[in-house]
Amino acid sequence: MTNSLRPTGHQRAPLPPVREPAAGVPSPRSSQTPKQTPDAAGSAAAPGAKPAKQRDAFFDNAKYLAIVLVAMGHAWEPLKGESRFLEALYTVVYTFHMPAFIIISGYFSRSFDMRPDRLKRLVTGVAVPYILFETAYSLFDRWVGGDPNQAISLLDPWYLTWFLVALFVWRLTTPLWKLVRWPIPLALLCALLASVSPEIGDDLDLQRVLQFLPFFVIGLFMKPAHFQLVRRREVRILSVPIFVTALIVGYWAVPRMNTAWFYHRDSAQELGAPWWAGIVMTLALYGCSLVLTACFFAWVPRRTFWFTALGAGTLYGYLLHGFVVKGSEYGGWFDHSWLHKPLGEIAVTVLAGALVTLLCTPPVQRVFRFAMEPRMEWAFKRDAAELARERARANA
């Protein structure tokens, strides 16, 4: 699970071909990198044996760094109202951190089809965690947050769980996007229509599902060469002034712009804007998101670091850190005045990064694997092809 590619020096080797991971955010572990028994390891080392596929350090690094930014952004929410610079940084991060996650999720969904084993992984890796964590967050809000009216409703995702709903819908529709002639323009049209349609409502957070859809479809049709393209030296150099410019524009826009535009969870009318503003703002934000996401990917390292293995546990960090952040809000921990000063904001940022790092570690994964990656063999019929293979092996 923690194996990673180690490119030599600064050689720009092409990224490995896409392989299907287990469903997750974008995946807690790859089903194609199973733990080897001693016999299996011996067989792999035998002459002529097919080598085991390895995880790619670039994508694990990208997932880890993105989840760290997600946790920091959530920790900044209670503080940003009193710091214009922090709110500018918050808006810049929110422009690209979820698009980056979603593009990677789309890229690793390229091989998804309606094959039984893949549908099973979609259910156990996305649908079941959604049910469990939506229930857990609702009870947490009721008992710890003190909201007696908080109901358990699987139709109304609370806080972080919307992404699991979105990933489930996007993955199910993957065969459709691979079938149509112009998938990216069609996904963009769906998103633009959603941005001017308040009638969609809040069920299953469909506004977010539809408005973030283009990034998933873009990921579906990306190739290793596209990621290699943004890794060029000139792109890395250019990304520095782009990020600086984004911060300056964000600082200017803080008192002039509603931050809710970056969440993609409301239509233009619900944000108090005319319908045509939804199309203009959505297109503008998509452009900014793609540029900043490319800049983010440009600085993601290709080689293995101490945090690379944690990229396999981003689902854990994503779903678990919300309890700590919300618990801190409910407990009034963000009300201390020193936290609203620069040193306090830095301390909160560091603590948020350390927290989500801890939650991605293997010990935490082992504890919560029952909820994140349940096997649930009892719930599914045995695949006919698998049974035939077992019978063939038994008769051999």
Image: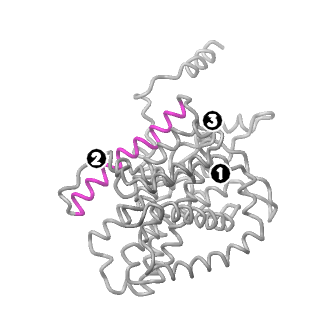
| Amino acid type of the residue tagged 1 in the rendering | Asn
Check the image and report above or below for 273 versus 364. Answer: below
| Residue 32 placement (x, y as % from top left) | 62, 40
Which is more toward the observer, 14 or 358?
14
Distance of label 1 from label 3 (alpha carbons): 34 Å
Q: Which type of secondary structure does the marked residue at label 3 adopt?
A: helix
Q: Residue furthest top?
A: 395
Q: Residue at x 56, y 53 (%)?
A: 312
Distance of label 1 from label 2 (alpha carbons): 39 Å
Reading the image, the residue beneath label 2 is 153
Reading the image, the residue beneath label 1 is 3
Q: Residue furthest left?
A: 148
Dominant SS in magenta: helix
Please give left or right for residue 140 compared with residue 169 in the image.
left
Please give left or right for residue 34 compared with residue 211 in the image.
right
Which is more toward the observer, 235 or 136?
235
| Amino acid type of the residue tagged 2 in the rendering | Ser
Q: Is residue 308 magenta?
A: no
Q: Nearer the viewer, mark 1 or mark 3?
A: 3
Q: Residue at x 48, y 62 (%)?
A: 276
